[in-house]
Image (cartoon, helix red, strand yellow):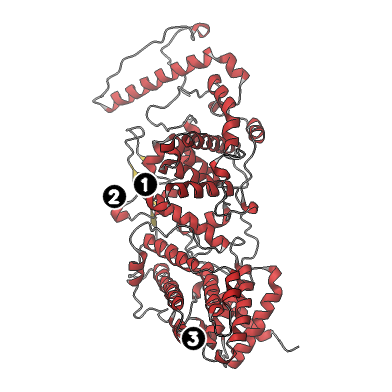
Amino acid sequence: MSEPNSDDTTPNSDRSEAAPRLRFVSARPDTKQGRREARAAIRAHASQASWAKIRKHGKQTRRDPISPIGSSQHTKSQRLSSTDEHASTELVSSSNDIFDVSISGRASASSQQAVPSRAARQAILDSISIPSPLRAVAVGDIDPFTSYPSRMPKEVATPIVDQGKPGIAPAHGLAECTRPVPTCVLADTNVSGHLPLLVNNFFNIMFLPDPERQEQSVVQHWISWYMNDSTLFHALCFAQLARSSTKVTELKPIDRRAYWYCYSEVVREVNRRFSDPSESCSDENILAVLALAFHGDATPDETDIPRSPSQGPMNSMQGLETYAGYLNPVSLHVNGLARMLSLRGGIADIEFPGLAAMLSYGDLLLASRALQKPIYPFVPIGESPELTLAAVDRAHHPLAQLGSGFRVLRDLIPEEESAEELLVTLQHLATYSLAVYDYVMGRPQALKLANLADQRNFVQHSLLSLNSKSNESREQLNSEDTFLLKEACWTSGAVYSLIAIFPVPHPKAPFGKLAKQLKQHLIYTSAHFARRWQTPSPLVLWMTFMGALASTADDESKETKAWYITVLERLVHRMLILSWENLREHLLKFLWFPSTSDTDGQQLWREIHTSNPFT
């Protein structure tokens, strides 16, 4: 806080009672010096007013040294104290609350954030000492040139919000690629009207705006929305602090305090809006709950643990590594969000630009971790991914043969209409792999990152939409049915997707589950198609290899991996495959991303040749 005006000669003992000395300034100074003097005068007057409040309420300040926003506002602290219990428990324990309705069940208890009780949260806040400069910041101490829709001191809020930096944003997990990802700068006239506001890197990562068509990006709408709505601003700060917690062992005390303060503010306002039918399921309220749903407890990044199989290359595009790996969803708020959207009529009625796409993406993250069908339809950020996929050029492409081997499915299951849908989806996985290769290698025909993000989400959504429940397999299986053959192809495609398309990080990626499922599918399929296995041998080889890769992710799957190695040894012997290069040629006819999986493939090849399944 600024010191009192040096021109004021009132003795210290009478300073709080003396009439404020005013100095009139020009509203529109003509010179730079005049503008500096006017700015200094305004700040001085604001500081004097705040200083007077602090002196006047000094006794109250000493009684409440750790209020959520600063120790000089006792009345505000009383209000927080009286309402904090209601706000912290209404979303948690009210039996009639909308958030008690369970719908999807995806965010399991093991992944649910432990939402603390009021007493626990207060204990956290009480144990944190606030630096002395922040103790002197009163409610009236708002910098007239930079302000936020929050009662947090700007010294706390600014470092949280201002994560964007001029120039180049971090690359999105592309070890092979050094192409820059642009940030955008927004001159926000709605917040203060004076200072340009750097857009948070988070919005650029999620929406991937085109630097050549910046005016068409939804980023500017989102940042303006957040900066003009107190609830959304606190949701933004809460989300940013949650993401920051994935990068450090523990948040700083001041950041931890801000984290719980922002959480309480969002919870309080969400519940208040539920009392108004016009606001209960509004876009604003849905977005606030979306922030609560996907920013649970952080899982430490245990970098020293071996991660097999290898994944990539687009590990961090659209925050995938963070939201599918390091941050856990909160089932309480996930179910509440699902209920809100159900009452709203689905995401088709969402009006705010880009929000439906973010809801669709969040649903896809949950579905990918749980291997379930997405609840909501796919919504892209930009143009149709089906059109951009169709535009990917295969002519003279180094990986042009990807997906060609799946044509055998038309001969194996010609009577099945769903086989065509599966074939199209597998071909889309192959085509997307070509587009990723173009981008990583910097080829001139490479698509923009936003197109790749929409393509990736589209093919993953299409793949998961074909998933079937395990009990259906027993009902549909008979001597002539091809259901399990399709399931084996789907499961193998899901393994490839988690490796090279939608790389959910270890250990959240369900590789072990897929390896066991595929083993059962292959066993049952081989029993029912014993006479027809000769023709699809390359397809069976690829599926078995995918299962072997998935089994390496789980130490408990040693028996499963041993089974895959045995089957692979027999297949390569029967197919007269004498080298890794020969085996790789077969894999490249289906789904295989060389720069990601060649090392793992060579390791499996060595294990195949050192195994002896007959001893």
Hey, which quadrant is residue 65 in on the image?
top right
- Rendered location of residue 60, percent (x, y): 58, 16
Number of the front mark, 3 or 1: 3
Between residue 217 and residue 312, name the one nearer to us: 217
Of residues 30 and 22, the one drawn nearer to the viewer in this rendering: 22
Q: Which residue is mark 2?
A: 215
The residue indicated by pointer 3 is: 412
Instruction: Name the residue located 62 percent from the left edge and 84 percent from the top edge.
Output: 568
Up/down of 102 relative to 492, above or below: above
Q: Is residue 169 visible?
A: no
> Which kind of residue does numbered mark 3 sit on?
Leu
Residue receiving disc 1: 352
Quadrant including the C terminus: bottom right
Point out the frontmost of discs 2 and 1: 1
* Outermost residue, right side: 615
Task: Identify the mark nearer the N-term, 2 or 1.
Answer: 2
Q: Gap in Å between the C-alphas at discs 3 and 1?
A: 46 Å
